[in-house]
């Protein structure tokens, strides 16, 4: 279930936080709604629905992502053809309200 479908009571509880950390590949995919975004789509644009600032920590184990420049994609691809699924590459990304 995408995180943008989170129940209102959880949204209210999260809104009391200064920052929420979301860790792991499965939770990262929930942040992105399991959608196939263009990899260079800014994370802050996709994560703008969060009620507070959110920090996503993730190693790539599935071919879904965002916020990765074309140069970074080329670098990763030239270093590791399976960079999106190998679990050896990762991101730390920020988004959400008031960021």
Image (cartoon, rainbow, N blue to C red):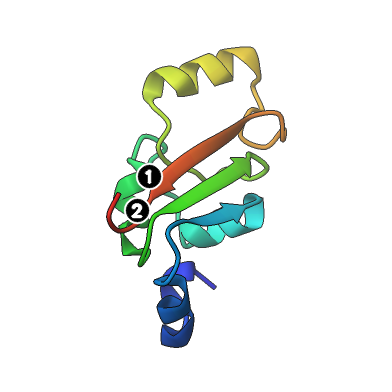
Q: Where residue 48 sits in the image (x, y, percent)?
A: 31, 57
Q: Is residue 17 left or right of residue 82?
A: left
For residue 71, above or below residue 96: above
Residue 34 is at least partly visible in this image: no
Q: Locate residue 76 relative to residue 69 in the image: left or right.
A: right
- Identity of the residue drawn at 44% across and 54% down: 54
Q: Position of residue 60 (x, y in %)?
A: 63, 39
Please give the residue where the numbered disc 1 appears in the rendered image.
43
Question: In the image, is 83 to the left or to the right of 92?
Answer: right
Secondary structure, mark 2, is helix
Q: In this view, does 73 lie above or below 10?
A: above
Residue at (63, 45) in percent of width and height: 62
For the residues bearing labels 2 and 1, Cβ distance under 8 angstroms: yes
Q: Position of residue 17 (x, y in %)?
A: 45, 65
From this view, report whether residue 31 is shown above or below residue 42: below
Q: In the depicted view, which residue is nearer to us: 83 or 99?
A: 99
Q: Where's the N terminus, which quadrant?
A: bottom right
Residue ID for mark 2: 46
71 and 20: which one is in front? 20
Residue at 56 percent of width and 20 percent of height:
76
């Amino acid at each position: 279930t995408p995180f943008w479908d989170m129940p209102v009571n959880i949204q209210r509880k999260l809104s009391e936080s200064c920052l929420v950390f979301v860790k792991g590949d499965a939770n990262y995919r929930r942040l992105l709604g399991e959608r196939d975004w263009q990899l260079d789509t800014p994370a802050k644009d996709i994560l703008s629905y969060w009620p507070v600032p959110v920090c996503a920590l993730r190693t790539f184990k599935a071919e879904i992502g965002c916020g990765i420049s074309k140069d970074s994609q080329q670098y990763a691809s030239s270093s590791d053809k399976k960079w999106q699924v190998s679990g050896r590459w990762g991101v730390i990304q920020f988004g959400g309200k008031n960021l």
